[in-house]
Amino acid sequence: MKILVLFTGGTIGSTADGATVHTDPAAAIPYAPVHAAAAAASRLLSLYRARFGEDVLFEVRRPCNLLSENATPELWSLLERSVREEELAVYDGVIITHGSDTLPYTCAALAFLLRDVPIPLVLVASNYSLGDSRSNGLANFRSAVELIASRQVRGVFTVFQDEKGANRVYLAARIQEADTARDQFTSYGGVDFGEIRGGKFVWNEHPDNPSPSEINQIPARLLPANWVFQEPVPALRPYPGLSYQWIRYDPQPRALLHYLYHAATACTQGKAYDLTHFLQECQSKGTDCYLAPFKAEGDALYETSRALLATGAIPLYRISFEAAYAKLTIAYNQGEHSSKRLIEQCIAFERLPERAV
């Protein structure tokens, strides 16, 4: 078996020096290949071979070396190019090492940008540096190998061992940010795609999940040319007392994402706190405003939700914050398709089926 491994840094490629975790403190260019990534790759692969043997041929690339909190959407573009430059037909799969902080955003972006890959592409992270006895990095890397070896699914996934030792498999467009107390990831909607159990991939048969046969239908490439990040899309989350009077954009963005409370609501009272006024102001300046997540079209809505939609803002249904943000950022940084039409599509199973909510 032959696997392409792209090392990008993150905790799985970091070193704990006393009380500080870092990649390479001498690396001044965030997205340049640096020698510290080579050391991280050597350490991880050495640990893997010592534990599991030499049965897999790994080919290593190091497109960048950074802690993922320093990532921008430029990383998504870099990783797409790095994958597409390879002759994928000679590999059984691809593993990308990544930091855990922004893992769900990169996962969602690559689920969209690389939805047509004919082999499994698995992103892996670690809760602690590899030298820490609490680290699950090696276990996650092994699970990625086992998912590829199963030859059951193609597409983009994430694997991450939870605190109980279960090796969970996530659809890349549904994984959400980790719990800040326990460093555990979740799937949007609460249903994981599957698990690595006894060295084998076990699909979680559930109405929320696409089947392996659905996953294995290779769709058309999303964008004909390599996608390049140029224009940020701002995103906001509600909280009691969020004052819009302090929020001004210069220049005005082409699009904006405002996430909502779980019932698809936000404040619509008080001049400083009324989201409807903010949406109207943004739209009057040419910004397309998106609201997420709504559950089902035709559902009864709170009067506050009705007021938000009455502004002309565009609802997004049954999608995580991370996937919605990645989708909007990609859609508004490409010129091949109508941004709004691209957003209407379900591209990589990011949207839960309506029956699931």
Image (cartoon, rainbow, N blue to C red):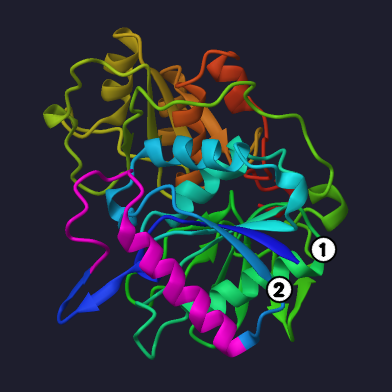
Q: Residue under label 1, please give it.
A: 151
**Front in this rendered view, residue 163 or 26:** 26
Q: Residue at x 29, y 9 (%)?
A: 285
Q: Position of residue 262 (x, y in %)?
A: 46, 51
Decide if residue 285 is in sight here.
yes
**Residue 285, above or below 48:** above
Mark 1 neighbour density, 10 Å: few (under 14) some (14–19) many (20 or more): few
Q: Residue under label 2, please give it.
A: 146
Residue at the extreme left:
246
Q: Earlier in the sequence, mark 2 or mark 1?
A: 2
Q: Residue at x 45, y 67 (%)?
A: 41
Disc 2, SS: helix
- The type of residue carrying mark 1 is Arg
Occupied quadrant, residue 133: bottom left
Q: Which residues are magenta?
A: 22-51
Occupied quadrant, residue 184: bottom left
Q: Position of residue 89 (x, y in %)?
A: 77, 46
Occupied quadrant, residue 99: bottom left
